[in-house]
Amino acid sequence: MINIPKARLLELKKKFKNKKIAVIGDMMLDCYFWGEVKRISPEAPVPIVEIDNEFYRFGGAANVAYNIIKLGGVPIPIGVIGDDSFGRIFSSLIEDAKIISSGLLVDPSRPTTTKSRVISDNQQIVRIDREKKDYLTKETQTRLLNYIEKIIDEVDGIILQDYNKGVLTPQIIQKVISLGNKRKILITVDPKFNNFFKYKNVTVFKPNRKEASDALGMKIKSQAEIELAGKKLLSKLNSKFVLMTLGEEGIAVFEKGKKEKTMPTKASKVADVSGAGDTVISTLTMALASDANIYEACFLANYAGGIVCEEAGIVPIEIDNLFNTILKDGK
């Protein structure tokens, strides 16, 4: 069991301020259309939803950047959006949140990755995805890498946030890790199935149970299976640490030559797990950039993930909410 004294918590909170974190990956826009179903369409046996409210939120790597700013940091999102109406909505959200936008490249050949949800009576009727999963063109990859090389000496940490939408190509992954390691910059990874084993030699590799299970081709249910999976990932990836999220069972932390540590979830009630992984990687990276050790960072990240799981929908973690909750629970 990890226990962080009050003085240390307050010290870490203070250090969070203005930590500059590059968030490289798939930027997304989440759209929500709320309405009421009063009748069935005469054109097909489907409900007609009369929309009375719509709103837009950050999704994917953009939600990670938003969590960083809410934790007191300075995110630098690096990725692509399309030259379309959703791209303009995304840009307006970035401007409203006062997030640095110079790393967001417009690629006219791709749509802005957008997930639109139609909801009635608190139930999702349909989700419409607009995306292109092909890898970025060589030209766009070069533009992104040139930008990363330009700003890399300014950052305190790098998050590689992969949703398999084409931004994190093998070339970009390899180059960013090489650049970061040469400068001894913290690198954390939130992977997906494609390119799972390309993320070698990073600081922290953070898959969830299903991602690790799919990539390793093994069941991960029992404690023994969790331990074996963690050891395999450390060996295959040569990462300094592996953090495996286990849903309602919390997280497991692995380090070479040491026994794994597990931390139970801090959620008292799970309303929605959407976005919890984004919150965990954001908090973990901010903590490590603020000189927390891996167990302190995982403790804070686990708490943050538990807090947002208690909220409906995708919400960021607020720094005061995080530290006040921990201090209150510690009394």
Image (tube, rainbow, N blue to C red):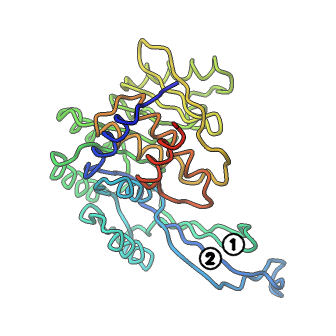
The kind of residue tagged 1 is Ile
Which one is nearer the viewer's eye here, 311 or 168?
A: 311
Q: Which numbered disc, 2 or 1, marks the residue that appears first in the sequence?
A: 2
User: In the shown orientation, is residue 304 left or right of residue 167?
Assistant: right
Q: Secondary structure at mark 1?
A: strand
**Neighbourhood count class around disc 1 (C-alpha, 10 Å): few under 14, some 14–19, many 20 upward:** many
- On the question of residue 253 being in view, the answer is yes
**Discs 2, 1 touching: Cβ within 8 Å:** yes
Q: Look at 41% across and 16% down and name the residue there.
A: 256
- Measured as percent of width and height from the top left, residue 197 is found at 44, 32
Q: Look at 42% across and 77% down and name the residue there.
A: 89
Q: Secondary structure at mark 2?
A: strand
- Measured as percent of width and height from the top left, residue 54 is found at 57, 79
Q: Which residue position holds label 1?
A: 119
Which disc number belongs to residue 33? 2
Which one is nearer the viewer's eye here, 113 or 208?
A: 208
The kind of residue tagged 2 is Phe
Residue 326, compared with residue 230, is above or below; it is below
Give the quarter of the image for residue 103: bottom left
Q: Residue furthest top?
A: 257
